[in-house]
Image (spheres, rainbow, N blue to C red):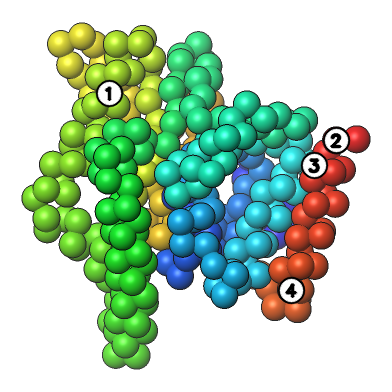
């Protein structure tokens, strides 16, 4: 895609990419990133899945996503990496800054005079807080379900049927899951209202959402960026307006060709060296 065709976006928020897992839609994400020119990019947790990371499964398309994000720094994009639970190892680096790149656990930014509170959201997860081993076991089960889902969709495609999301059907059919999502949203809204924020922005639950929540103490706009495993969504902010971006509706991005040379010919070591060189360039 020519540079002139890239869509300009003031702010893009992406979460729950889970690079390093079978369920990650890295090529679709790469096409989306190649279709836009963001002034600011916030990576809101679980970008790299360090819980399930394995050298045995790290396709070059996953490294290409990291390389592209890094290359945005050289093009003037301000990037903030907010830590999540699957990449919690990075929390020890909170406060790190290098040029227009920074790592943090949470972020408050001003948008057209309104305050936006941005964080991953796992702090509200009781399972994460008290039974981390159980949460990790659940993550492995989730990844297995994604693998099964891929096989099912392959068979459905052969018979001319549309794709389905088994994980989404499971979540939608389990009452406790629906209750958890509602509790998550309301808790985030309550705290945001108490602190005087106009927006509260999370990830973590893989549930893209944009809605106004009103309580006795006030109201706030709750937003969730969704994920790049099931929903393939992000949040975009332009000229005072929010929207949920959905890859499935973006025909232009879907038509972008990923270079076979970039996807297959380069091994991860070569891509990593190129990534480091670009990253160091931003220091000059």
Percent coordinates x, y for residue 154 in the rendering: 36, 84
Tell me which label, 2 or 3, sits earlier in the chain.
3
In front: label 2 or label 3:
2
Tell me which label, 1 or 4, sits earlier in the chain.
1
Comparing 90 with 242, the one in front is 90
What residue is pinned by disc 3? 74
* Image quadrant where one finds the C terminus: top right
What residue is pinned by disc 2? 283
The 10 Å Cα crowd at callout 2, few under 14, some 14 to 19, many 20 or more, is few
Q: Are marks 4 and 3 in contact (CB under 8 Å)?
A: no
Residue displayed at 43% across by 22% down: 117
Percent coordinates x, y for residue 92 in the rendering: 57, 35
What residue is pinned by disc 4? 267
Q: Give the distance between the C-alpha atoms of the residues marked 2 and 3, in whole angstroms.
A: 9 Å
Residue displayed at 47% across by 65% down: 21
Residue displayed at 46% across by 56% down: 51
Q: Secondary structure at mark 3?
A: helix
Report whether 256 appears left or right of 21: right
Q: Give the distance between the C-alpha atoms of the residues marked 2 and 1, in whole angstroms.
A: 38 Å
Q: Give the distance between the C-alpha atoms of the residues marked 4 and 3, in whole angstroms.
A: 23 Å
Q: Can you name the residue that lies furthest to the right here?
A: 284
The 10 Å Cα crowd at callout 3, few under 14, some 14 to 19, many 20 or more, is some
Q: Secondary structure at mark 2?
A: loop
Percent coordinates x, y for residue 55 in the rendering: 60, 70
What residue is pinned by disc 1? 189
Comparing 259 with 269, the one in front is 269
């Amino acid at each position: 895609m020519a540079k002139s065709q890239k869509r300009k976006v003031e702010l893009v928020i992406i979460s729950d990419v889970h690079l390093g897992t079978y369920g990650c839609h890295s090529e679709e994400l790469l096409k989306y990133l190649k279709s836009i020119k963001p002034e600011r990019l916030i990576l809101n947790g679980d970008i790299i899945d360090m819980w399930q990371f394995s050298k045995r499964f790290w396709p070059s398309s996953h490294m290409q996503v990291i390389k592209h994000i890094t290359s945005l720094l050289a093009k003037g994009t301000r990037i903030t990496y907010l830590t999540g639970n699957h990449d919690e190892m990075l929390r020890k680096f909170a406060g790190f800054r290098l040029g227009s790149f920074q790592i943090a656990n949470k972020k408050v930014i001003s948008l057209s005079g309104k305050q936006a509170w941005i964080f991953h959201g796992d702090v509200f997860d009781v399972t994460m807080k008290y039974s981390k081993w159980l949460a990790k076991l659940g993550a492995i089960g989730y990844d297995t379900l994604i693998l099964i889902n891929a096989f099912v969709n392959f068979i459905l495609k052969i018979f001319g049927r549309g794709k389905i999301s088994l994980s989404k059907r499971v979540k939608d059919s389990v009452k406790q899951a629906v209750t958890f999502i509602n509790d998550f949203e309301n808790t985030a809204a309550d705290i945001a209202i108490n602190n005087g924020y106009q927006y509260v922005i999370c990830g973590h639950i893989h549930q893209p959402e944009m809605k106004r929540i009103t309580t006795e103490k006030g109201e706030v706009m709750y937003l969730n960026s969704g994920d790049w495993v099931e929903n393939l969504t992000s949040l975009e902010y332009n000229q005072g307006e929010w929207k949920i971006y959905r890859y499935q509706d973006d025909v232009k991005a879907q038509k972008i060709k990923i270079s076979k040379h970039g996807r297959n010919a380069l091994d991860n070591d070569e891509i990593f060296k190129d990534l480091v060189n670009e990253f160091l360039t931003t220091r000059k």
